[in-house]
Image (spheres, helix red, strand yellow):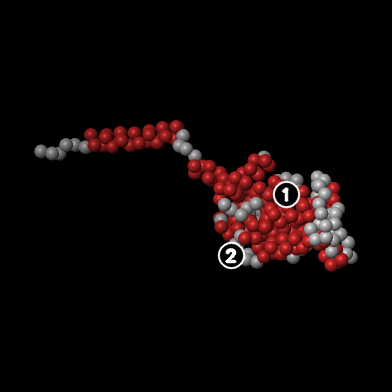
């Protein structure tokens, strides 16, 4: 079921030229649909090849390489979402943009080993996995919220139905009303719900497209012919039953 839903999301994204990043959902994962590499520790990721820092040609540690890879994956996957235009939540894309800028700054700090200035909160120590996880969760949280907000903006009738429990029994309120920006890790506890809304919407819209393009079946055609034939017979009967009043 997960594989089918992800495929549907990806196909719908391409058909409708949306900013949705369905293909990235498979790569990065969320609570409901897949495993979540964004919140794993670096030890669980495949060992990379040796990489050198760009500014001082020093060898990056394995941990640093993996942290950069995680940050860059989040940036690459969700950066286009910041281009979505929202009327009532106009400031939300700016929040995502800032989260991306902060992640890019972390990458620069790692590459140059400038932790004394780039990680003062930890006394100039290298970034911990929890800090990288917070940064990637922040990007992902904001991006998902923006995409759901776009649905609420463009299809309010469907969204009201979705948040009333009619389409998913576990979603009985609008999660966007509970969002508060500013936390270091965004709102990861809400990611699963936001992702579920996106998945259900994609499935519903894809089904609508399929149904609208479906060919007429032979039984439907037969029924149509039978109706037309019956109408013609009734018309003939009416005409023949009409008395001839001509002289």
Mark 1: few, some, or many residues within 10 Å (few <14, many ≥20)?
Answer: some
Query: x, y (%) of residue 56?
Result: 83, 60
The N terminus sits in image quarter? top right
Residue 181 located left or right of residue 151: right
Question: As drawn, which residue projects farthest toward the left?
Answer: 247
The C terminus sits in image quarter? top left
**Distance of mark 2 from mark 1, alpha carbons?**
28 Å
Q: Residue at x 81, y 54 (%)?
A: 52
Q: Residue at x 61, y 54 (%)?
A: 19
Residue 73 located left or right of residue 11: right
Q: Residue at x 58, y 59 (%)?
A: 153
**If you read the primary sequence from the N terminus, does the residue marked by circle 2 or circle 1 appear first?**
1
Work out whether residue 104 or residue 235 is closer to the camera in this orientation and state it: 104
**Residue 121 visible:** no
Pointer 2 residue: 87
Pointer 1 residue: 28
Residue 110 located left or right of residue 181: right
**Residue 27 visible:** yes
């Amino acid at each position: 079921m997960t594989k089918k839903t992800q495929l549907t999301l990806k196909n719908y994204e391409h058909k409708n030229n949306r900013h949705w990043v369905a293909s990235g959902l498979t790569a990065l994962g969320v609570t409901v649909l897949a495993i979540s590499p964004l919140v794993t520790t670096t030890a669980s990721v495949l060992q990379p090849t040796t990489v050198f820092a760009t500014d001082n040609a020093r060898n990056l540690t394995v941990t640093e390489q993996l942290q950069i890879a995680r940050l860059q994956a989040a940036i690459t996957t969700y950066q286009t979402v910041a281009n979505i235009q929202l009327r009532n939540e106009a400031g939300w894309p700016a929040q995502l943009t800032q989260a991306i800028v902060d992640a890019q700054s972390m990458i620069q700090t790692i590459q140059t080993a400038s932790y004394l200035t780039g990680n003062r909160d930890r006394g100039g120590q290298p970034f911990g996995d929890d800090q990288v996880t917070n940064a990637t969760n922040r990007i992902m949280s904001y991006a998902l919220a923006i995409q759901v907000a776009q649905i609420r903006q463009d299809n309010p009738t469907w969204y009201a139905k979705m948040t009333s429990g009619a389409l998913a029994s576990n979603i009985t309120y609008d999660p966007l009303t509970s969002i508060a920006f500013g936390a270091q890790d965004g709102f990861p506890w809400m990611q699963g719900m936001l992702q579920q809304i996106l998945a259900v919407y994609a499935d519903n819209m894809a089904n609508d497209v399929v149904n609208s393009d479906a060919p007429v079946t032979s039984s439907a055609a037969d029924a149509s012919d039978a109706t037309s034939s019956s109408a013609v017979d009734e018309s003939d009967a009416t005409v023949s039953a009409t008395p001839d009043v001509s002289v």
